[in-house]
């Protein structure tokens, strides 16, 4: 009798396991399944002007470059748009059903699991080597890099640019020995990505969850003398706090941002790339960028200029 009960428990556990696995894979879907359901689920972390959220009465309103881009893509496919709010810590979990993050200079997958909640990540996601192991990226649609930014009263002084980005990065890293530098795990501002612990800098990580757009207010509040910041947030910060901050120089080489897809959604990715190329070709994409990042054309004009075929 005891053995029979044990077998029943084992069988029940096995069927529960099969159900969990089948449920996980049934949630993964490509373009055909998305069209059949009639909704495109956009996963987005509120960040810079890519994804913004505000309340209007009792209603939550989403806006930003990526929100407009995804709404347009959904309309292009004849689908209803749905926004799925995420954080930098769980954004890949919502897409793939299992967590993925960069820890101790290596990719860690599967520490946490949950049902898949969306189809596309679009929030100015930087293309990083470890992320390419987790998702497939679209064509690049926005330029970026990580800079060191300091308060205007800091003793740190902007470097004199050379003809070499590698040399410029070395100059910046040489300045931050014993300097407080604010950074953020799980994002493109992760200090492990740029070997910042080898510089002698005092790396400060937030003791609570912090948004990227809170990095500048933190250093203005004297939480640290300087912070890592990427290009989009830096452009916004320079406009929002004129005269209160200064760009010291680059911490990374040039980077690119793109939309992220599950690796089993190639048709959805292809459909988006075709849509994005059409927007770029007819000028609608540049108009959209100009609405949210007008100054980016002064810094990265070549990126947004159509390449002539010769």
Image (cartoon, rainbow, N blue to C red):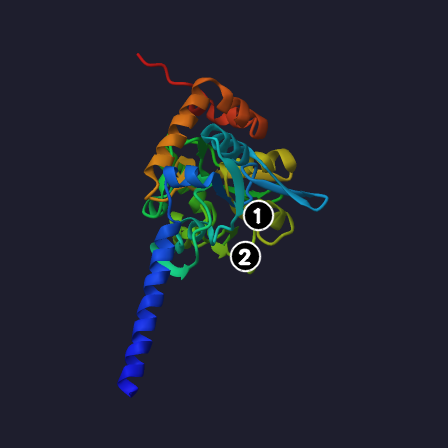
Q: Residues within 10 Å of mark 2 (few under 14, many from 20)?
A: some
Question: Horizontal placement of 254 versus 64: left or right?
Answer: left
Residue 215: mark? 1
Between 223 and 142, the residue placed more toward the observer is 142
Badge 2 or badge 1: first in the primary sequence: 2
Q: Residue furthest right?
A: 57
Residue at image coords 48%, 55% = 203
Instruction: Write down the quadrant of residue 126 in the picture.
Output: top left
Relative height, residue 27 to residue 67 (above, below): below
Between 301 and 35, the residue placed more toward the observer is 35
Residue at image coords 45%, 41% = 37
Q: What x and y, as percent, mark residue 4?
A: 28, 82
Q: What x and y, as percent, mark residue 176?
A: 47, 49
Q: What x and y, as percent, mark residue 261?
A: 39, 41
Q: Which residue is mark 2?
A: 206
Relative height, residue 108 to residue 307 (above, below): below
**Would you say residue 158 is visible in this rendering?**
no
Q: How many numbered marks, from 0 up?
A: 2
Q: Residues within 10 Å of mark 1 (few under 14, many from 20)?
A: many
Inter-mark Cα distance, 2 to 1: 9 Å
Residue at image coords 54%, 57% = 206
Q: Residue furthest bottom?
A: 1
**Would you say residue 51 is visible in this rendering?**
yes
Q: Quadrant of the N terminus?
A: bottom left
Question: Horizontal placement of 142 versus 157: left or right?
Answer: left
Relative height, residue 15 to residue 27 (above, below): below
Relative height, residue 215 to residue 284 (above, below): below
Question: Horizontal placement of 28 versus 243: left or right?
Answer: left
Q: Are marks 2 and 1 in contact (CB under 8 Å)?
A: no
Q: What x and y, as percent, mark residue 286?
A: 50, 23
């Amino acid at each position: 009798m005891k053995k029979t009960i044990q077998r029943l428990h084992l069988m029940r556990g096995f069927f529960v396991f099969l159900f969990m696995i089948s449920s996980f894979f049934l949630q993964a879907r490509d373009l055909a399944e998305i069209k059949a359901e009639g909704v495109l689920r956009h996963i987005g972390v509120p960040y810079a002007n890519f994804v913004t959220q505000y309340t209007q009465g009792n209603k939550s309103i989403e806006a930003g470059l990526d929100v407009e881009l995804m709404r347009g893509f959904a309309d292009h496919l004849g689908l209803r748009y749905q926004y799925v709010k995420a954080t930098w810590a769980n954004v890949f979990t919502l897409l793939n059903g299992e967590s993925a993050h960069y820890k101790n200079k290596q990719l860690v997958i599967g520490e946490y699991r949950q049902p898949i909640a969306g189809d596309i990540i679009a929030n100015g996601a930087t293309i990083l080597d470890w992320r390419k192991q987790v998702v497939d990226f679209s064509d690049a649609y926005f330029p970026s890099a990580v800079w060191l930014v300091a308060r205007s009263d800091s003793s740190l002084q902007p470097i004199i640019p050379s003809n070499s980005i590698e040399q410029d990065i070395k100059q910046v890293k040489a300045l931050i020995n014993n300097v407080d530098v604010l950074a953020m795990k799980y994002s493109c501002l992760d200090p492990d990505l740029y070997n910042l612990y080898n510089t002698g800098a005092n790396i400060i990580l937030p003791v609570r969850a912090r948004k990227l757009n809170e990095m500048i207010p933190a250093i203005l509040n004297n939480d640290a003398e300087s912070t890592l910041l990427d290009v989009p947030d830096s452009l916004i910060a320079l406009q929002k706090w004129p005269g209160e901050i200064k760009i010291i120089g680059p911490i990374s080489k040039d980077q690119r941002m793109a939309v992220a897809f599950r690796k089993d959604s190639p048709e959805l990715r292809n459909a988006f790339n075709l849509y994005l190329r059409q927007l770029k070709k007819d000028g609608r994409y540049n108009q959209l960028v100009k609405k949210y990042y007008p100054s980016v054309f002064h810094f990265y004009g070549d990126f947004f200029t159509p390449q002539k075929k010769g």
